[in-house]
Image (cartoon, rainbow, N blue to C red):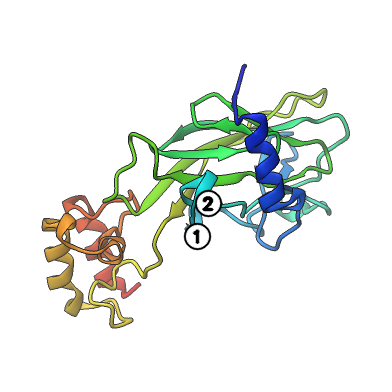
Amino acid sequence: MTYRTLHGWTATVLVAVFGNAVFAQPHAGDVIVGRSGANVLRIDPGGFVPDDEIVLLPPSSGLFNGWADNNPGFDHLVVDEPENDLFTLASGCQIRLELVAADPAFRAITNTFAIIDDPGERALLGGAALHAHLTWHVNSDHASFDPLKVLWRATFKLVDTGTTGYATSSEFTFHFATVDCVRGDCNGDTAIDGRDIADFVATVLDPAGHTDEDRCRADTNRDGYASVEDIGSFVGMLLTGT
């Protein structure tokens, strides 16, 4: 596959701005990659679990207009966890991250400056001792960027193209937010209760007339939009208070 890459001068500037370390620094909270006893690639539930978390991207400008960050990254499992059916990777594996689907205006940029934004495109994470950080970018210059959207989703899977031939992992979805909020707390009083109903209704009926934070609070189903599609999940939050 031929990836679209950033121009050479852009790559030079990126390294100057971020430093080479931005793509390879170890960080707490990385996605930990291992395999099952049946040799299926797996994510360690003790590390960062994309489906369970929302990643807040900071604002960025210049080469990365919009919001961007290089966390979380990917790291290899160090010690076998047989009680979790999770084992370390063997020599000879070549683990790649394959994009399954992504919301418009989202892209990932690899440490070789390949742009990953179309399904089927892959980024090499490494071998048995893999450790890699991609840059996650919500591109506000993209023709399909929607200013009413507050969260972007990107679904991936892990693929082994090495001699070990591990089976492909289950798909997992990252959620990247461009505004910080407590979903469901629509009146901003730090509690999720009946007093949030009026603000929730007002926001989902007129999202364009409300702030980014308002829309974020009302986006209880985490699809990126404040809409009537959030009613079911909002009611669920009211019933549990969370």
Q: Residues within 10 Å of mark 2 (few under 14, many from 20)?
A: many
- Residue 85 in the image: state x and y as whole percent: 72, 47
Alpha-carbon span between mark 1 and mark 2: 6 Å
Q: Which residue is mark 1?
A: 58
- Residue 96 in the image: state x and y as whole percent: 68, 32
The answer to whether residue 42 is left or right of residue 194 is: right
| Quarter that holds the N terminus | top right
Circle 1/circle 2 CB separation < 8 Å: yes
| Quarter that holds the C terminus | bottom left
Q: Quadrant of residue 190?
A: bottom left
- Return the mark for residue 242: none
Q: Residues within 10 Å of mark 1 (few under 14, many from 20)?
A: some
The kind of residue on which mark 2 rests is: Ala
- Residue 24 in the image: state x and y as whole percent: 75, 49
- Residue 175 in the image: state x and y as whole percent: 46, 51
| Residue 98 visible in the shown view | no
Q: Which residue is mark 2?
A: 68
- Between 162 and 125, the one lying in front of the other is 125
